[in-house]
Image (tube, rainbow, N blue to C red):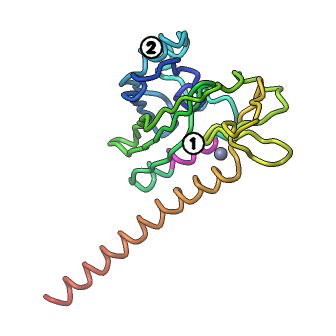
Amino acid sequence: MALLCWKCSVLPDRTASLKFFQSFCVVDSSLRILWVGGDWDDFARSNGGVSALSNTILSTRLTAHIADRATADRVSQMVQAVLETRRPLHLDYRCDAPHQVRRFRLTIQPMKHGRAVMVHQLLDAVQVDPPMVAWRYDPLARSQKCSVCGAVLVDQTWLDPTLPEFEHPSRVGYTTCPTCDARIAAALRELVETVAETEFAEVVALQDRDQTR
Ligand SMILES: [Zn+2]
């Protein structure tokens, strides 16, 4: 979700007002962007992300704006699962700036006509002092950063970059870490199980109704 808050590409360098940050994105079953709203354009402009303004990205595919394949696949899986089960899905994620740890919640909600709305809501923003080394996306970078939790892979261990003495690499490639893969897999499983339980309860209710007739 590079564009869609997943990689901070449209997030501005603001503090207090960030507490009200909320953006919306409606996609169809092919992940085509039908509408964006909320604080979207304000944040795109204030961050210099003119290419991410709503009138530029409408009708393009959501995954075209996600830098790495792993994240694009996870987003696609989550949206498809919501559309198939007709149940909402929630996923908390980090979208930090060098000076700020930011926690967001993504909610994907089913809509009519095979569409889904993705809501990104800022939960919390905490200053980092001293700030982390600024980083930017580089597909050729040796360092990998998780696009969901912000952890960085160091010597085969995923570390939170706000740990003391940790020096954030200045160039990173994006992916999803095993912990976040497991969280997303669990969220997808829960959707399917909730549907199965609901359907089972409906069958039992129908049987009870028939028996009382
Ligand atoms: Zn992660």
The three-letter code of the residue at mark 1 reads Ser
Residue 125 place in picture, x, y as percent: 48, 32
Above or below, 165 against 59 in this view is below
Disc 2 target residue: 55
Left or right of 166 on screen, residue 162: left
Residue 152 place in picture, x, y as percent: 74, 39
Above or below, 191 against 113 in this view is below
First in sequence: mark 2 vs mark 1: 2
Left or right of 164 on screen, residue 27: left
**Secondary element type, mark 2:** helix
Residue 156 place in picture, x, y as percent: 84, 48
Disc 1 target residue: 76
Q: Which residues are magenta?
A: 73-80
Q: Is residue 78 magenta?
A: yes
The three-letter code of the residue at mark 2 reads Asn
Q: Is residue 155 magenta?
A: no
